[in-house]
Image (tube, helix red, strand yellow):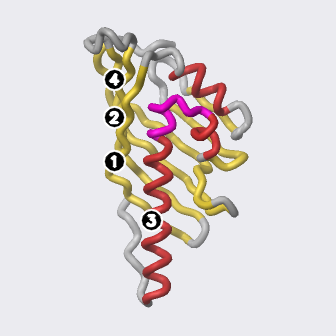
Amino acid sequence: MPPTNPPTGSADQLRWLVDRAAISDLLIDFARALDDQDWKSYAANFTEDGAVIISPLVAKTITHRGREGLAEFVAGNLGRYAGTHHLSTNHAITLDADTADARSAFVAAHLFDTHDPLRHADGAGWHYWKLRRTPDGWRIAQLTLEVCYLSGEPLLH
């Protein structure tokens, strides 16, 4: 998905740039909240009806819908690790007024023990985002996480 071309006209160009920066900041904060185990902030990055869809890691797709319970959902999965390190890069953003689509690359390391950095489970792939402008700014309406590869030890299930 190629990013949208900037509009013409100074005011439209400025709004386009500000929206793209705000969306990119949101995607980066998504990763920060995971690594800081700041589950409340993680959930606040989503719309009330937001959804997370994780492509099959072993045998089935994992899905959570709605902001309610989202903090517990992610804490139940990533909270089992001693630490994580998430990178969100290559944000390709397509804007359409108050909605946007984006694709970004991710790399995620999951540490089993902070005293043994050689024990980790890693994954990488693509995030496909559907975003919506809200009164509180841009929020994630849907995230589809497509895992392309895993390495290291198996992920905890």
Q: Where are the magenta residues, as a range?
A: 31-39
Q: Where is mark 3, residue-wise?
A: 20
Question: For the residue marked with disc 2, what is the amino acid?
Answer: Val
Query: Which circle marks residue 107 in the picture?
Result: 2
Q: Are marks 4 and 2 in contact (CB under 8 Å)?
A: yes
- Depth check: give the residue in front, 63 or 117: 117
Q: Are marks 1 and 4 in contact (CB under 8 Å)?
A: no
SS for dot 1: strand
Q: Where is mark 4, residue-wise?
A: 122
The answer to which image quadrant residue 120 occupies is top left
Q: Are marks 1 and 2 in contact (CB under 8 Å)?
A: yes
Question: Residue at point 53% right, 20% down?
Answer: 79
Question: Residue at point 57% right, 39% down?
Answer: 42
**In the orientation shown, which residue stands out farthest toward the bottom?**
9
Residue 75 falls left or right of residue 149: right
Residue 130, x across and y down, in percent: 55, 53
SS for dot 2: strand
Query: Which circle marks residue 89 in the picture?
Result: 1
Q: Are marks 3 and 2 in contact (CB under 8 Å)?
A: no
